[in-house]
Amino acid sequence: MLIDNCLQNSEEWFRARAGIPTASCFDKILTPVTLKPSKSATNYMYQLAGERLAGCKTETYSNSVMQRGIELEAEARELFEMVYDVEVEQVGLVYPDKKKLYSCSPDGLVNGSSGLEIKCPLIHTHVSYLLEKKLPDEYILQVQGGMMITGFDKWNFMSYYPGLPPLIIEVQADGKIINAIKSELKDFCGKLDEVTDKLKGFN
């Protein structure tokens, strides 16, 4: 595991993420439930190849809900620290090794043995998470991908909405999912290199 302590959402952070698959987008490479290749994989590959040549991260969609989530993240992290009496280490990017083929950006590392993923959704979504009491399907690959990259065997998922009880779930590493991510990533990264090389030929 290799840690880059750049500040998340900073220019340096976006630049470091340019051109490499990240855990938050692993669902663009394969689907979370069936673990089959995603229909979004080709477009995501072209995006990353373009970023490699441009040398910068492409603009990403953002709205008031997403901005609100970013602002509430620190509040949620402090609550997690208080509930579990731990200090959460904030990091920028984590790579599996020096090759830096892909990465994740956890919302924190806990005691050097697990990760933390925080979501601050709209109230109706948070209520649905509370009632279901499980890791939402849309974050399975992000969380399992984080464990694949860090080597941790557990990860904390937290959904937070001010004034309501938080949902905190400890997720265990799933070998089947992690192996599927590894396999698909190997193929994806190989094709990404090929596309990048073809683009370089146009210069």
Image: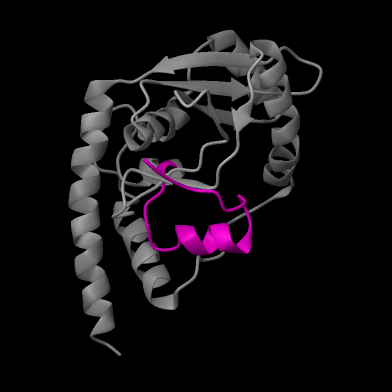
Q: Is residue 119 above or below residue 155?
A: below
46 and 124: which is toward the camera: 46
Q: Residue furthest bottom?
A: 203
In the displayed structure image, the side of residue 40 where residue 159 appears, left or right: right
Query: Residue at the location (50% across, 43% down)?
Result: 105
Tell me where residue 131 appears, x and y as whole percent. 59, 9
Magenta stretch?
1-23
Task: Tell me where residue 15 appears, x and y as whole percent.
Answer: 51, 64
Q: Is residue 197 magenta?
A: no
How far from the left and from the top, in percent, is residue 34? 27, 28
- Residue 111 seen from this side: yes
Q: Quadrant of the N terminus?
A: top left
- Residue at position x 68%, y 12% from top? 83
| Horizontal relation, residue 145 to residue 184: left or right | right
Q: Quadrant of residue 202?
A: bottom left
- In this picture, residue 187 sits left or right of residue 86: left
**Toward which corner of the image does residue 50 lie, by quadrant?**
bottom left
Indicate yes or no whether the magenta region holds residue 6: yes
Indicate the quadrant where residue 191 lies: bottom left
Is residue 36 visible in the rendered image? The answer is no
